[in-house]
Structure formats: structure tokens, C-alpha cells
């Protein structure tokens, strides 16, 4: 193998190591957000599972395919390299679709958060304390949400809990959390897609070189 082919081989190998780490990042983000939102979903009856679950699924797929690509590059397997490149193109499409779904649908979800939290607060204030504890917030709009009722301990970092040392409202905190999650997932997906395009091209180039090398050996 010449210098150029050798460079492509090892660039492809180390690129797939990056993909494996990126897949783990997507998986970790999905798990973290799913756990963080578990209380909100159960109390406010929200359906916020699409984005984190999609992130976890894509993360696992990226990790597995990256491992496949590493093996194909090191072993110089034409079949594995072509399969890897095809899967990379499919993953690119999936990530673009995931980013579009998150960015397009996120504003609607974020905009509806105050309505959902207000309803959950009105129905069961005791259960709402789980949201307050998780996100370190107080009531849907702040301590004034409780009117003249004494504030629960979940509204403050330290006792005694009063309006002077209470957290801010849950509406803004949860909305900011969702916006940040959407931005991080979108940025990670765009970066990974850009590198996947290069990896797919390198994979096909290396596969073509391996195929030609085997043909030359046959003569």
C-alpha cells in the first residue's frame, strides 16, 4: 500500500474512533435528558420522549457502525468498507431528519410548557414538588404562584423557605433546559454529519483500492 492509501486507511480508522465517541455522547445526552424529564412527563402528562429516545437510538447506531468501520479499515475488507459507507450515508440522513424534527418541533413544545405546568400545578401541588426539586424552581411562575400559602421546602435551597430565598419559576427554567438540549443535539448532529460525509467518501475510496489490489493479485 502506498503512502496515500495508508493515510486514508488510518484517517478512516481514527475518524471512526471519533464517531464512536460521538455516538456515546449522543447516547449519554439522550439518557441524561430522559432521566431529567421523567418527573415532568409523569406529573404534567407531557410527551417529551421523542427527542431523547431518538438521540439514544442514533447514538447506539453510530457507535456500532463506527466499530464496524474501524474493523473494515484495519482488515482492509472491501465488503465491510462498502457496508460501512452505505450505513454512514443512511446515518447522515437520519441525523439530518433528527435535527430537523428537533429544531422544527422544539419551539412548539417550549411554548406549551407554561400551559402544561400550570395545569399540573393546579391538579396536584404535592406531586409538583418533584419538578421543583429536580429543576430547583418554585411554582410555574415563581413563589407568587402559591399566593398566600406558605412555600414548600422544595422551593428553596435552605430552610426556612420564604419569598426572599426562593427559586425562580419552573416555566422559564424548564424552557431554557429544553432549548439548550435542542441546541446541543443539533450542533453535535451537524458536526457528526459533516465528518460522516468525509468518512463515507474515504471508505469508498479505500474499498475501491482494496478491490483493485485483489484484482491485480489475481493476474
Image (cartoon, helix red, strand yellow):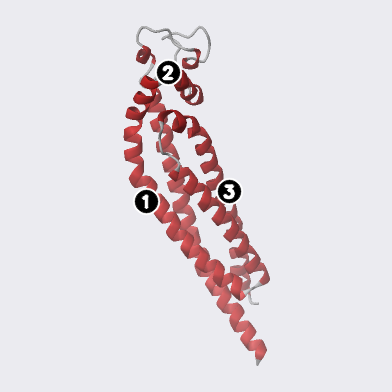
* Upstream in sequence: badge 3 or badge 2: 3
Asked whether the residues under the numbered discs 3 and 1 touch, taking CB atoms below 8 Å apart as contact, a structural biologist would say no
SS of the residue under disc 1: helix
Picture coordinates of residue 32, whole percent (x, y):
54, 38
Front in this rendered view, residue 102 or 74: 102
**Percent from the top left, x then y, of residue 155?**
46, 16
Looking at the rendered structure, which numbered label has been put on residue 125?
2
For the N terminus, which image quadrant?
bottom right
User: Residue at point 50% right, 6% down?
Assistant: 160
Q: Is residue 212 left or right of residue 108?
A: right
Q: Residues within 10 Å of mark 1 (few under 14, many from 20)?
A: few
Residue at image mark 3: 24
Relative placement, left or right, of 125 versus 60 is: left
Disc 2 vs disc 1: which is toward the camera? Answer: 2
At a point 38% along the width and 18% down the height, the residue shown is 142
Whole-number angstrom distance, CA of label 3 to CA of label 1? 21 Å
Q: Nearer the viewer, mark 3 or mark 2?
A: 2
Name the residue carrying label 1: 100
* Residue contact between numbered discs 3 and 2, judged by CB atoms under 8 Å: no
Question: In the image, is residue 42 above or below residue 205?
Answer: above
Quick one: label 3 or label 1, which is nearer the N terminus? Answer: 3
Q: CA distance from mark 3 to mark 2?
A: 37 Å
Amino acid at each position: 500500500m502506498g503512502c496515500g492509501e495508508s493515510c486514508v486507511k488510518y484517517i478512516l480508522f481514527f475518524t471512526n474512533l471519533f464517531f464512536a465517541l460521538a455516538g456515546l455522547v449522543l447516547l449519554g445526552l439522550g439518557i441524561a435528558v430522559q432521566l431529567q424529564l421523567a418527573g415532568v412527563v409523569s406529573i404534567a402528562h407531557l410527551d417529551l420522549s421523542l427527542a431523547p429516545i431518538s438521540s439514544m437510538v442514533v447514538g447506539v447506531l453510530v457507535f456500532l457502525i463506527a466499530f464496524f468501520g474501524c474493523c473494515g479499515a484495519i482488515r482492509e475488507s472491501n465488503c465491510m468498507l462498502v457496508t460501512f459507507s452505505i450505513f454512514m450515508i443512511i446515518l447522515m440522513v437520519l441525523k439530518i431528519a433528527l435535527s430537523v424534527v428537533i429544531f422544527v418541533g422544539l419551539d412548539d413544545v417550549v411554548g406549551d410548557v407554561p400551559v402544561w405546568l400550570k395545569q399540573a400545578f393546579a391538579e396536584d401541588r404535592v406531586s409538583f414538588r418533584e419538578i421543583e426539586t429536580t429543576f430547583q424552581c418554585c411554582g410555574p411562575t415563581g413563589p407568587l404562584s402559591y399566593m398566600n400559602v406558605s412555600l414548600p421546602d422544595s422551593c428553596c435551597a435552605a430552610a426556612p423557605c420564604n419569598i426572599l430565598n426562593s427559586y425562580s419559576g419552573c416555566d422559564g427554567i424548564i424552557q431554557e433546559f429544553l432549548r439548550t438540549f435542542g441546541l446541543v443535539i443539533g450542533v453535535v448532529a451537524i458536526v457528526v454529519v459533516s465528518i460522516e460525509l468525509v468518512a463515507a467518501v474515504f471508505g469508498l475510496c479505500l474499498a475501491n483500492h482494496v478491490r483493485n489490489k485483489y484484482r491485480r493479485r489475481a493476474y
